[in-house]
């Protein structure tokens, strides 16, 4: 693991997401995993470090937390009574939800992390599992990775668009500022 992040912070983020999305009909296990991926990716891009200690891999329906550590954390929270697994009928299919059984401890997050977390949750709160999976299929890192290959956070910077002149100018300005 490249980042030293408290397991408690990871657990609190799972509980936070579950508590914020619990009343959304579209919320299920898929949205929980995608929320974690998007939050960690955005945190890495904005702060240089993810919020959780998860790594993400290519799965058939998009990037997901590496299964063993994610499932271990989720199961531990369920055993401790912090999360409750429920199954409901959602348009003729079984939907698995994890519902927070307590309020999250938000004191473990920095203010800038909470902004990122809330922005991501707000942006995905009304999308379906298939919509969020389709969206994550646009990540260049996911497109070119082999099945179950780890997706390093820096790969979320990859894009399929060509840089514009303004991007080169910005990069040159940044390089000059370091030479001064």
Image: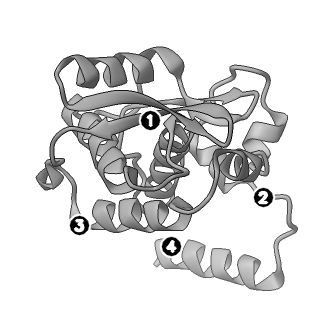
Disc 3 target residue: 111
Question: Can residue 5 be spotted in the picture?
Answer: no
Disc 1 target residue: 97
The label on residue 154 is: none
Disc 4 target residue: 179
* Residue 25 location (% of width, % of height): 51, 52
Q: Nearer the viewer, mark 1 or mark 3?
A: 1
* Residue 36 location (% of width, % of height): 46, 43
Graded by Cα atoms within 10 Å as few (under 14), some (14 to 19) or many (20 or more), the crowding at tag 2 reads few
How far apart, in angstroms, are the residues tagged by discs 2 and 3? 28 Å
* Residue 96 location (% of width, % of height): 50, 31
**Dot placed on the residue nearer the N-terminal end, 4 or 1:** 1
How far apart, in angstroms, are the residues tagged by discs 4 and 1? 52 Å
User: Horizontally, is 108 left or right of 130 in the view?
Assistant: left
**Dot placed on the residue nearer the N-terminal end, 4 or 2:** 2
User: Horizontally, is 85 left or right of 150 in the view?
Assistant: left
Q: Nearer the viewer, mark 1 or mark 2?
A: 1
Q: Report the quarter where the N terminus lies.
A: top left
Q: Are the residues tagged 1 and 3 within 8 Å (C-beta)? A: no
Above or below, 50 relative to 74:
below
Graded by Cα atoms within 10 Å as few (under 14), some (14 to 19) or many (20 or more), the crowding at tag 3 reads few
- The foreground one among 80 and 13 is 80
Q: Quadrant of residue 166?
A: bottom right
Q: Nearer the viewer, mark 4 or mark 2?
A: 2
């Amino acid at each position: 693991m490249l980042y030293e992040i408290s397991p408690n912070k990871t657990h609190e983020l799972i509980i936070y997401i579950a508590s914020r999305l619990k009343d959304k009909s579209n919320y299920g296990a898929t949205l929980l995993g995608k929320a974690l991926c998007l939050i960690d990716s955005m945190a890495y891009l904005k702060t240089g470090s993810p919020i959780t200690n998860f790594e993400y891999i290519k799965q058939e329906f998009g990037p997901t937390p590496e299964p063993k550590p994610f499932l271990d954390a989720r199961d531990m929270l369920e055993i401790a009574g912090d999360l409750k697994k429920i199954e409901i009928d959602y348009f003729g299919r079984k939907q698995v939800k994890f519902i927070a059984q307590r309020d999250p401890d938000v004191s473990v997050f920095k203010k800038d992390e909470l902004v990122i977390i809330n922005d991501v949750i707000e942006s995905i709160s009304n999308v379906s599992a298939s919509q969020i999976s389709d969206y994550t299929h646009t990540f260049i890192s996911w497109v070119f990775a082999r099945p179950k290959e780890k997706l390093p956070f820096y790969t979320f910077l990859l894009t399929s668009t060509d840089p514009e002149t303004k991007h080169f100018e910005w990069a040159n300005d940044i390089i000059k500022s370091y030479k001064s």
